[in-house]
Amino acid sequence: RRLRVAPKGGLEGQPVVAGRALQQTGQCDVSTLGILGLGFAHNCLGKAVGKACIIECGDGYSINGVPSVRSCTDSGAFSGSGLPTCIANLCTMGLPSDLGVAHSCAGVATDGTCEATCTQGYGGSPTQFTCRSNGEVSGSAPTCIAQACGALFLDVRYDSSLCSGKTPLQTCIVGCSEGWSLAGSAASYEC
């Protein structure tokens, strides 16, 4: 016996499941679960009529409420309603921390992104990080190169020549210029 294609895309006399007849697949269509967004996990793929499956929260998410149980029906859709509330877990490990690096990763949660940039006094391009389900952010910190501080503009009585070319966190000593006498100690400056 040959099956004929019905006008609505299924086989004549059979329910349609995502463009295929239920009789051909024998499985429910997972698009009927109503799962939108990130954070859900389920074992519904490939479920046959009369079989049940569970919708819960995926790795990196905490459940608020209870998992949802669905059943595969003769119509090719899953019965049941409601979904658990899945809350993304915060990433607290692997935060960028190199010298001259700042980041916006505090408070980022599973599947979220953040940026690492170079702090004032350092040059480099920003990079992206992603919060993974294991609680760690992944990405490569930017290469931040220390930039020389600007020249010290002091009164002519002071010799600041030792401060030229210093980079952030480096120090230099400022003494008296030639012809001037030091009263006390030389001053230390930090870039």
Image (spheres, rainbow, N blue to C red):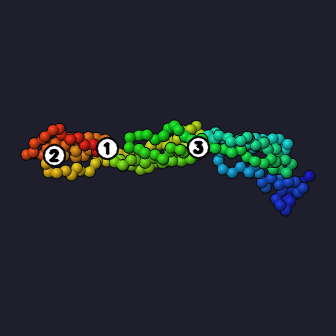
Among the two numbered marks 2 and 1 on one chain, the one whose residue lies closer to the N terminus: 2
Give me the residue at 19% from left, 46% from top. 160
Could you tell me how far apart the alpha carbons at marks 2 and 3 are, in whole angstroms? 54 Å
Looking at this view, is 60 or 15 the one in front?
Answer: 60
Which mark is drawn over residue 168? 1
Q: Is residue 42 visible?
A: no
Foreground label between 2 and 1: 2
Foreground label between 2 and 3: 2
Residue indicated by mark 3: 110
Could you tell me how far apart the alpha carbons at marks 2 and 1 are, in whole angstroms? 20 Å
Few, some or many C-alpha atoms within 10 Å of disc 3 (few <14, some 14-19, many ≥20)? many
User: In the rendered view of the protein, which quadrant contains the C terminus?
Assistant: top left
Left or right: 173 with respect to 110? Answer: left
Residue indicated by mark 2: 159
Q: Amino acid at mark 3?
A: Thr
**Up/down of 151 relative to 186, above or below:** below
Q: Is residue 108 visible?
A: yes
Q: Would you identify the image quadrant in which residue 6 lies?
A: bottom right
